[in-house]
């Protein structure tokens, strides 16, 4: 039974990992972010961060590691996660030109900034609600 669990777990992880790499590679999100921010000199740092972040996240997912950290470290950690997710979403929308297409289709061409700010404030409100109200 343990062998079957091992094979299923490994296969699932492999499928998710391949999907994540395909997502980052085929859509060109990280190269586009590097191009937009003009930070090609940090390419090795970006590659290392993606690999180490994936390995560290996998380690934390499969172990019962808990540590007490000061509140300021938690705030910094959360900010870094928020910046990464925001940049990833921004890179994805930049690559796919999602927002210009949506605003054109719903007739809000002149209100793109309002449309983007509604998404930003909605995301902030939803995150605050989740972490301040639901997680207790």
Image (spheres, helix red, strand yellow):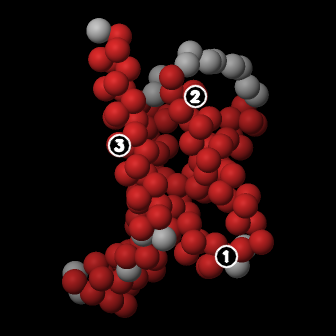
In whole angstroms, how far apart are the C-alphas of marks 2 and 3? 17 Å
Task: Give the side of residue 10 with respect to residue 53, left or right.
Answer: left
User: In the image, what residue occupies the spot 37% across and 51% down?
Assistant: 19
Identify residue for label 2. Answer: 59
The image position of residue 102, as x and y in percent, is 28, 78
- Residue 59: name its quadrant: top right
- Residue 122: name its quadrant: bottom left
User: In the image, what residue occupies the spot 43% across and 45% down?
Assistant: 17
Pointer 3 local density, CA inside 10 Å: few below 14, some 14–19, many at least 20: few
Q: Nearer the viewer, residue 59 or 100?
A: 59
Label 3 secondary element:
helix
Identify residue for label 3. Answer: 15
Pointer 2 local density, CA inside 10 Å: few below 14, some 14–19, many at least 20: few
Whether 26 is drawn above or below 134: the answer is below
The image position of residue 41, as x and y in percent, is 77, 72
Label 1 secondary element:
helix
- Residue 84: name its quadrant: bottom right
Identify residue for label 1. Answer: 37
Whether 98 is drawn above or below 80: the answer is below
Q: Nearer the viewer, residue 4 or 68?
A: 4
In whole angstroms, how far apart are the C-alphas of marks 3 and 1? 31 Å
**Label 3 vs 1, first from the N-terminus:** 3
The image position of residue 55, as x and y in percent, is 59, 37
């Amino acid at each position: 039974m343990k062998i079957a669990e091992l094979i299923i777990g490994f296969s699932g992880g492999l499928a998710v990992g391949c999907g994540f790499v395909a997502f980052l590679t085929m859509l060109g999100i990280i190269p586009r972010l590097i191009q937009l921010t003009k930070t090609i000199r940090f390419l090795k740092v970006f590659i290392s961060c993606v690999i180490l972040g994936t390995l560290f996240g996998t380690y934390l997912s499969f172990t019962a590691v808990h540590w007490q950290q000061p509140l300021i470290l938690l705030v910094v950690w959360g900010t870094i996660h928020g910046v990464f997710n925001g940049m990833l979403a921004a890179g994805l929308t930049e690559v796919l030109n999602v927002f210009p297409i949506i605003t054109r289709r719903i007739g809000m061409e002149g209100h793109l900034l309002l449309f983007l700010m509604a998404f930003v404030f909605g995301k902030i409100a939803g995150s605050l609600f989740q972490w301040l109200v639901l997680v207790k």
